[in-house]
């Protein structure tokens, strides 16, 4: 469908996006907002007190904050407080949606989306859910029966079997600046070129990387250490100790607690060591960057392990579970990969093939088609793969 067809006669359709405060939910919501705005829609974001909105890039998207509480963990008192927050948030969302009168409510998972989607259901507003992970989150599992359609990021998404007929594979929308990296070639390192390793921990952070990576990389052969440039996200109070370890063994490094220029960092990287959140996997695929994936072991329902194995099975990376990861094993894997540019290049190609670069447009299509009554026409298989083969 063209943008003109979507917007003809419906220039001011309003979409209410419900998303939590973490990047894993907000990044795809932002990408969808951009696609809808380009088609003439109005867009609002409904989040909780943690939600910072979409920033200065999308000032036309109004942000509303409501009460919300976690769905799992804690004792009886904490659970009671969370339920009270959810109930109050649903009341706030009921009043807000009554004023806004959106044409559709789109939930991106996480507990902050629950009150808005429950209120939308009560107001008979059509609901579309988007699931970023290979194992569906608890919020989307709770809300799935209320949705007209559920957009998923992986062809085999676990946890939504009871509503399988409503699933449509769109992919996970990715930030435009990172999606643009997909058209740029992977810079295969030559025999004497600088080797660039990027280490990130995702929104959960990765304190374990602060200790593990320096010990592992200092075990590399001297010829690799001399060519290595490490760019690492170091959270907490360990920055100086990590820097000192790298300096002592002669490794060039740049350490920060947060990188606000991730597209540029990815573009310059040959290999990553990182977690396996949905946005991380999506961005690795879009940028075509190979990675050693260490899933966060305490993620809800261990969903990062599912994400990691899907990406690795496609050939884009290698999974190393944290529970049996040692500096020696990590050093061996990093050394083997950095010494084999051909393997890195093949993994880069496989990562790109795993990507759904038009995911935001497909999700926008799905929303419009669902409202127009023909949402069932979107195929469940991954589109475009046959044509690319």
Image (cartoon, rainbow, N blue to C red):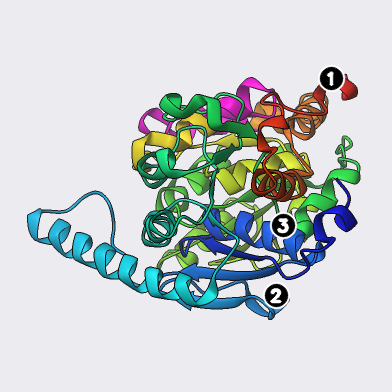
Q: Which mark is residue 58?
A: 2
- Magenta-highlighted residues: 310-334
Quarter of the figure that contains the N terminus: top right
The quadrant of the picture occupied by the C terminus is top right
* Upstream in sequence: badge 1 or badge 2: 2
Q: Residues within 10 Å of mark 1 (few under 14, many from 20)?
A: few
Decide if residue 14 is on the left or right side of residue 338.
left
Percent x, y of residue 367? 66, 49
Report the Cα–Cα distance between label 3 and label 2.
13 Å
Q: Which residue is mark 1?
A: 386
Question: At x 19% / y 65%, what residue is drawn?
Answer: 84
Using a 10 Å C-alpha cutoff, classify the residue at mark 3 as few (fewer than 14 neighbours), some (14 to 19) or many (20 or more).
Answer: many
Q: SS of the residue at dot 2?
A: loop
CA gap, disc 1 and disc 2: 35 Å
Q: Which label belongs to residue 175? A: 3
Q: Quadrant of residue 177?
A: bottom right
Of circles 3 and 2, the one toward us is: 2
Q: Nearer the viewer, mark 1 or mark 3?
A: 1
The earlier-in-sequence mark between 1 and 3 is: 3
Q: Position of residue 39 (x, y in %)?
A: 81, 62
Question: What SS does tag 1 mark?
Answer: helix
Above or below 158: residue 200 = below
Q: Position of residue 313 (x, y in %)?
A: 62, 20
Q: Is residue 300 above or below residue 49?
A: above
- Give the spatial CA distance, label 1 vs label 3: 25 Å
- Label 2: how many Cα within 10 Å (few below 14, some 14–19, many 20+): some
Q: Nearer the N terminus, badge 3 or badge 2?
A: 2
């Amino acid at each position: 469908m063209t943008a003109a067809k979507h917007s003809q006669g419906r220039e001011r359709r309003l979409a209410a996006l419900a998303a939590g405060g973490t990047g894993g939910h907000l990044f795809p919501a932002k990408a969808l907002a951009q696609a809808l705005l380009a088609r003439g829609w109005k867009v609002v974001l409904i989040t909780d007190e943690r939600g910072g909105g979409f920033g200065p890039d999308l000032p036309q998207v109004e942000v509303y904050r409501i009460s919300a509480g976690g769905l799992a963990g804690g004792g009886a008192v904490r659970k009671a407080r969370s339920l009270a927050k959810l109930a109050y948030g649903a009341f706030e969302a009921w009043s807000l949606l009554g004023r806004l009168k959106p044409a559709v409510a789109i939930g991106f998972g996480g507990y902050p989306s629950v009150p808005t989607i429950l209120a939308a259901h009560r107001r008979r507003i059509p609901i579309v859910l988007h699931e970023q992970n290979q194992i569906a989150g608890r919020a989307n599992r709770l809300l799935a029966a209320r949705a007209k359609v559920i957009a998923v990021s992986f062809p085999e998404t676990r946890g939504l079997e009871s509503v399988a007929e409503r699933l449509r594979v769109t992919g996970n929308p990715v930030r435009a600046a990172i999606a643009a990296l997909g058209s740029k070639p992977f810079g295969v390192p030559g025999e004497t070129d600088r080797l660039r390793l990027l280490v990130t921990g995702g929104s959960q952070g990765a304190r374990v990387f602060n200790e593990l990576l320096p010990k592992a990389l200092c075990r590399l052969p001297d010829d690799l250490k001399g060519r290595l440039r490490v760019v690492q996200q170091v959270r907490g109070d360990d920055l100086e100790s990590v820097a000192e370890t790298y300096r002592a063994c002669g490794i060039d490094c740049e350490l920060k607690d947060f990188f606000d220029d991730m597209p540029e960092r990815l573009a310059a990287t040959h290999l990553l060591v990182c977690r396996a959140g949905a946005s991380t996997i999506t961005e690795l695929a879009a940028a075509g960057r190979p990675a050693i994936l260490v899933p966060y072991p305490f993620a809800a329902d261990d969903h990062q392990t599912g994400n990691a194995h899907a990406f690795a099975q496609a050939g884009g990376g290698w999974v190393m579970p944290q529970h049996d990861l040692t500096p020696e094993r990590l050093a061996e894997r990093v050394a083997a990969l950095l010494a084999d540019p051909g393997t890195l290049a093949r993994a880069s190609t496989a990562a790109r093939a795993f990507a759904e670069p038009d995911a935001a447009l497909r999700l926008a299509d799905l929303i419009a088609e669902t409202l127009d009554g023909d949402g069932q026409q979107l195929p469940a298989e991954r589109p475009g793969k046959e044509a690319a083969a």
